[in-house]
Image (cartoon, rainbow, N blue to C red):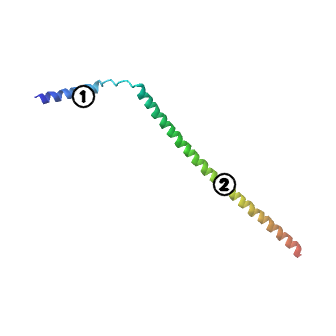
Amino acid sequence: MSEKIQLIKELWNMASNMVNPPAKPEETPQEKQIKTSIQALKDITDIALKIEQVDATIRATTNALGNIEEEIKRQRTISLLAVVVSGIAVLLVFLLK
């Protein structure tokens, strides 16, 4: 019988806690400081990840610009060679007439 009474008391306490949960104790200044520090570390980590992403983007853009610059130099060289060959061809035509 006492087991049933004990079980009823436990159920009553559980139901009471659900309806009126016990008050949470106030945070201590140290706990508040710890939570603030943890949030600051999370924010710093997020910023560091964003900086890393921006840095990777800048490196990729710099590499692409370097490749474009090399291609422009190559195209200029080809154009210059085409002009020189055309000039030589024109001179040969005049010299052979």
According to the image, label 2 marks what residue?
Answer: 66
On the image, which quarter does residue 79 sit in? bottom right
Residue 71 in which image quadrant: bottom right
> Earlier along the polypeptide chain: callout 1 or callout 2?
1
Q: What is the x, y in percent for residue 8?
A: 17, 28
Residue 52 position within the rendered picture, expressed as x and y whole percent measured from the top left: 55, 45
Depth check: 30 or 52 in front?
A: 30
44 relative to 66 in the view: left or right: left
Quarter of the image for residue 16 reads top left
How many numbered marks, from 0 up? 2
- Residue at point 66%, 53% (across, down): 65
Q: Could you tell me the amino acid type at mark 2? A: Gly
Residue 73 location in percent, x, y? 72, 59
Q: Residue at label 1?
A: 14
Which one is nearer the viewer's eye here, 87 or 74? 74
Residue beneath the point at 77% across and 65% down: 81
Q: CA distance from mark 1 to mark 2?
A: 70 Å
